[in-house]
């Protein structure tokens, strides 16, 4: 007597496993930092077809290793190799290669700089404040950001000259907290023009010692032309420089210091308009 329970033939099992395999996507990234990995995964899942399953994010450790993996890629499966735009975006030849996704912003955290989402997060955090419009007005994000933008862009121009010449001088790892205004022992939520300018002059001296004044002047002009009118939401590291400032300012206005920055980042990743990141991925997902 045959059972009424349907069974799968070996051919069907093979076909299903093949389809599952074909719908898996293998993604290789730079970051080993768990918070950045979580943000990357959230944005990718929001941006791609829901039928595509992400195998997992394979952390390679740095840009060079991701590119090495890309050059050894497996052409029989769906693979994406994602690297930060970094300051390399200003001077490297970024010819399109399908499967090698070069972010069009400094790093994955730069996609979180979405004003509507930041305002929403501010209001959620300010659980004792009911007047959202007044809160946003006081927060004054655009004017505040523009002030930071001028200072940080000037600093990252110098960082870009160092990167262009690959001199091994400390740049982004120099803490933003060392460049912030203070009142007594209290640290403020904005950059210090005096400290930024001192940092710039100190770096200039170190760079000129290594490459000479004439080359420094030429490279400075070259980098300035490449930057044009780009803002710090693209050129400056949001992870290391911009978001720490934003979150401290947000906590101050929300009168709530309990939320961790890592949690705030992930909440932003679930709120932001995904179109900019999606546009970055889409050419690499097209068939053919």
Image (tube, rainbow, N blue to C red):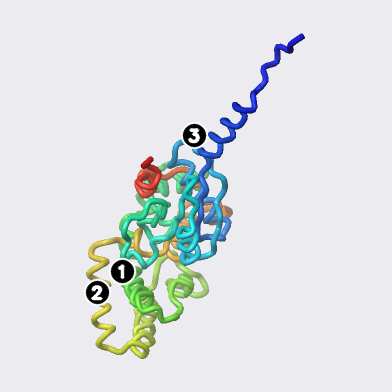
- Residue to which mark 1 is pinned: 91
**What is the distance, in whole Å, between disc 2 and disc 1 at their CAs?**
9 Å
Query: Looking at the image, which is closer to me, 168 or 287?
Result: 287
Secondary structure category for the residue under label 1: loop
**What is the distance, in whole Å, between disc 2 and disc 3 at their CAs?**
45 Å
**What is the distance, in whole Å, between disc 1 and disc 3 at their CAs?**
37 Å
Residue pictured at 51% horizontal, 51% vertical: 27
The N terminus is located in which quarter? top right
- The first of marks 1 and 3 along the sequence is 3
Secondary structure category for the residue under label 3: loop
Residue 61, placed above or below residue 4? below
- Residue to which mark 2 is pinned: 222
- Residue to which mark 3 is pinned: 51
- Residue farthest top in this picture: 1
Residue 149, placed above or below residue 48? below
- Circle 2 or circle 1, nearest the eye: 1
Relative side of 55 to 224, left or right: right
- Circle 2 or circle 3, nearest the eye: 3
Relative side of 173 to 278, left or right: right
Residue pictured at 60% horizontal, 32% vertical: 14
Task: Characterize the local packing of mark 2: few (<14), some (14-19) or many (20 or more) Cα atoms within 10 angstroms.
Answer: some
Secondary structure category for the residue under label 2: helix
């Amino acid at each position: 007597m045959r059972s009424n329970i349907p069974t799968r033939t070996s051919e069907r099992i093979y076909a299903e496993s093949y389809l599952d395999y074909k719908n898996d996507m293998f993604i290789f990234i730079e970051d080993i930092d768990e918070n950045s990995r979580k943000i990357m995964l959230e944005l990718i899942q929001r941006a791609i077809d829901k039928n595509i399953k992400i195998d997992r994010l394979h952390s390679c450790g740095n840009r060079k290793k991701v590119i090495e993996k890309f050059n050894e890629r497996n052409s029989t499966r769906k693979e994406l190799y994602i690297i930060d735009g970094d300051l390399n975006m200003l001077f490297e030849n970024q010819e399109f290669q399908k499967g090698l996704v070069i972010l069009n912003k400094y790093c994955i955290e730069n996609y979180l700089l979405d004003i509507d989402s930041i305002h929403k997060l501010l209001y959620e955090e300010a659980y004792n404040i009911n007047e959202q419009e007044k809160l946003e007005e006081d927060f004054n994000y655009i004017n505040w950001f523009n002030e930071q933008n001028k200072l940080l862009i000037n600093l990252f121009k110098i960082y870009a000259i160092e990167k262009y010449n690959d001199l091994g001088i400390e740049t982004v790892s120099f803490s933003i907290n060392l460049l912030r205004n203070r009142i007594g022992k209290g640290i403020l939520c904005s950059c210090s023009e005096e400290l930024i300018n001192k940092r710039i002059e100190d770096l200039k001296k170190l760079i000129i010692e290594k490459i000479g004044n004439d080359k420094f002047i030429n490279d400075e002009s070259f980098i300035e032309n490449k930057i044009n009118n780009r803002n710090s939401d693209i050129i400056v590291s949001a992870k290391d420089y911009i978001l720490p400032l934003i979150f401290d300012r947000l906590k101050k206005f929300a009168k709530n210091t309990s939320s961790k920055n890592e949690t705030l980042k992930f909440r932003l990743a679930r709120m932001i308009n995904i179109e900019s990141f999606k546009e970055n991925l889409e050419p690499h997902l097209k068939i053919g």
